Image (cartoon, rainbow, N blue to C red):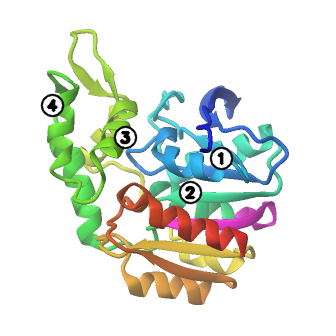
Amino acid sequence: MTTKVQPQDRTVTVNNGMKLHYLDWGNQGAPNVLLLHGLRGHAHSWDDVSQALCQDFHVLALDQRGRGDSDWAGDGDYSGAAYLADLVGFCDTLSLDSFILVGHSMGGRNSLAFAGRHSHRLQKLVIVDLGPTADPKGGQRITQEMIDVPEEFDDFEAVVRHMAGGNRFASDSVLRRRLKYATRQLANGKIGWRYDLAIREQRRNGTAPPAEDLWPLLPSIGCPTLIVRGAETDLLPREVADRMVETIPTAEVVEVSRAGHMVFEDNPEEFIQAVKNWLAA
């Protein structure tokens, strides 16, 4: 039986004092893999994936600004440019000049933005259920969920009950892990969200920064690229994934069954196998 690896909590400071927390899964000297979570995610979102990859790779899972144990943006800047600057600063600080980048949803957008400008630093790129163009239905669902979710709950079980209704495929253990690291105990003893609520407020009042048009960047991505799509996703249309394959010089797409937008949480076994097979090819 393979012994489970326990990651090390680490922090680096980039860009005007922004402190970014990440999980280091060890195996120094192996090829580096950097994992970027989505809009409401965190570094621990990837735990199943990290555990599966860390035998062969040096896995780093980043808490992007405003999430997990990373700093919140004091000026409320959660623009694509700010995430990209953080990512470049993180890679520069850790001297990541030849690595594999994996990004889901918002992390996928940030990964595409990085790859389109710094492709020479990447060995390979994995984009999970995200394209330059999204299905409006999925985007509206995510926005509405953020608008409607309560700010606090009486206890952790109340959080689980509330969030379970919107998760068709994720197992109870995966959902509980996600919510464990997405919540915190408040001063009043109740349970609240761990991410910067300014992110949600921008969704509520329509002030979220406009998304960059990523299509012009795609032809500049020179590294092998895998696009992973959940077969039941409401965010990445198949035609968009196919257009990405046509636009990125060396790209292919794979679908994971029994999975929506949260592909690697909905069906971790199939997702991990697809990614491991592609990385080994």
Other residues around mark 2 within 10 Å, as few (<14) / some (14–19) / many (≥20): many
Which sits in the foreground, 76 or 277?
277
Q: Tell which circle, 4 or 3, labels the residue nearer the N-terminal end.
A: 4
Instruction: Give the distance between the C-alpha atoms of the residues marked 4 and 1, in whole angstroms.
Output: 35 Å
Q: Tell which circle, 3 or 2, labels the residue nearer the N-terminal end.
A: 2
Other residues around mark 3 within 10 Å, as few (<14) / some (14–19) / many (≥20): many
Instruction: Give the distance between the C-alpha atoms of the residues marked 1 and 2, in whole angstroms.
Output: 8 Å
Residue type for callout 3 = Arg
The magenta segment is 116-128
Q: Position of residue 216 (x, y in %)?
A: 60, 77
Which sits in the foreground, 207 or 267?
267
Q: Quadrant of residue 210?
A: bottom left
Q: Which residue is mark 4?
A: 158
Q: Which residue is mark 3?
A: 178
Q: Provide the secondary structure element on which disc 4 rests.
A: helix
Q: Residue at x 49, y 72 (%)?
A: 228
| Residue 14 placement, left or right of 130 | right
| Figure check: 179 above or below 105 | above
Residue type for callout 4 = Ala
Q: Provide the secondary structure element on which disc 1 rests.
A: helix
Other residues around mark 4 within 10 Å, as few (<14) / some (14–19) / many (≥20): few
Instruction: Give the distance between the C-alpha atoms of the residues marked 4 and 3, in whole angstroms.
Output: 14 Å
Q: Tell which circle, 3 or 1, labels the residue nearer the N-terminal end.
A: 1
Which sits in the foreground, 17 or 174?
174
| Residue 109 placement, left or right of 174 | right
Say if mark 1 contacts mark 2, CB within 8 Å. yes
Residue type for callout 2 = Asn
Q: Residue at x 27, y 51 (%)?
A: 206
Residue 110 marker: 2
Q: Position of residue 25 (x, y in %)?
A: 66, 38
Residue type for callout 1 = Leu
Residue 87 marker: 1
